Amino acid sequence: MSDFSDRVTGIQPTGVRKMFDLAGDDTISFGLGEPDFQPPPVAIEAFHQAMLDGKNKYTTTAGMPTFRQTIAQSWEAYQPGMDEHNVCITMSGTNALLNLFLSLVNPGDNVLLPEPYFPLYGPDVSIAGGEAKYYSCLFENEFIPQVEDLEALVDEHTVAILYNFPSNPTGGTLNDQQRDALLDFAAQRNLWIISDEVYDRIVFEDKHVSFMGTGYEKVFIVNSFSKTFAMTGWRMGYIISDNREAMQQIIKMQYYITACSNDAMQYAILTAMEKASDYPDIIAAEFQIRRDYIVSRLNAMPGVECHSPKGAIYVFPKVNVPGMNSEEVAMELLKDGVLCSPGTAFGPSGEGHLRFAFTIGMDQIQSGMDKVERTLLRLQC
Ligand SMILES: Cc1ncc(COP(=O)(O)O)c(C=O)c1O
């Protein structure tokens, strides 16, 4: 018998870092979904100042009321009338996700999850004692799930469905009509919707389409400052819902996970939201330039088909090299000095795909794409 719980022995380390650990110092890395920018300087200064001012203590579990109020107001265009009671600060989107699964799932329940996926979802559901059931988001459907696939999966033990738009790893986004179809599916079966919208401010061309403000009362939005304010290392995020009663349960759970979140950082991020509110747009504009370049380069390469993602920081092209699977292609690229993630790191339907995160500067993207082109030309011969 193992000395450890089934909870921990039943989960595996994620595959995404596997290639990363093999990379050399001079490898060009399209591997990690971490913006290469720094947080806005006003936020760093405010963080320092807050610590000097003694903000080094526990805060209320849900976080500082003015900070939560500002977050609630930032959703005003989607859902007017929310305030601090609608928001719980968490120590990252990762923490927010775990909180929600622990709060919504009983042993024996199941949760519908996207596939290809952000690799935390499934293990989180199993830590909560539930079963993960995966619905596909395929290239041929522009990475949008099909309601008939969801109908085929759902059963009387399904309690929640997770949507992730803009998506990691596919870059898929929704239009209003697609969102409404996914909403109706969940509402008709009385499912909780966990909508992971951590890339909500990194959208290109169209506006972000949210599950907030739809009138359905069983919706939680997961958000994070990691990507939009380039604060991955700060580990700050939040859960927001227009269902205040539901939020009370979430806040209760949060106490037992982290008690509260980082005191000084709440001041720092509040300052960023007030004084550098356009920062996410500045970052998104830079990501859009990179996306345009990388998509046009990839589509000109042999065996490659790439959608132009309307959001997030990834492209997820189909890469067809006869006789090779996506992990083997990724290994060949790595030998030639380029790190990317094989699609299968995000689930079986990622086979035949590679994920490139455009989280490096244009110079590196250009030389990286030159290398990818050379490798693919070599492999196609
Ligand atoms: C889709 C998605 N959700 C959630 C997260 C978690 O973000 P964090 O824990 O840094 O807030 C990530 C990070 O890569 C992500 O891609």
Image: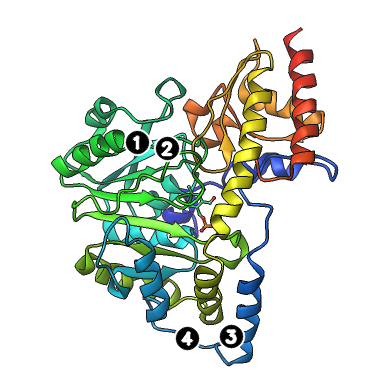
Residue type at tag 1 = Asn
Q: Are marks 2 and 3 in contact (CB under 8 Å)?
A: no
Mark 1 and mark 2 in contact (Cβ < 8 Å)? yes
Which is closer to the viewer, label 2 or label 1?
1
Give the amino acid type for the residue marked by disc 2 in the picture.
Thr
Q: Categorize mark 2 by other alpha carbons within 10 Å: few (<14), some (14-19), many (20+).
A: many
Q: Report the amino acid beneath label 3.
A: Ala
Q: Are marks 3 and 4 in contact (CB under 8 Å)?
A: no
Label ID, residue 58 = 4
Which comes before the other along the chain, label 4 or label 1?
4
Mark 1 or mark 3, earlier in chain: 3
Question: Residue 330 sits in which quadrant?
Answer: top right
Which residue is label 2 attached to? 173
Give the colouring mode of the picture: rainbow
Q: Which mark is residue 50?
A: 3
Q: Earlier in the sequence, mark 2 or mark 4?
A: 4
Question: Which quadrant of the figure contains the C terminus?
Answer: top right
Helix, strand or loop for disc 3: helix
Report the disc number at residue 175: 1
Q: CA distance from mark 2 to mark 1?
A: 7 Å
How far apart are labels 2 and 4 at the CA level? Answer: 38 Å
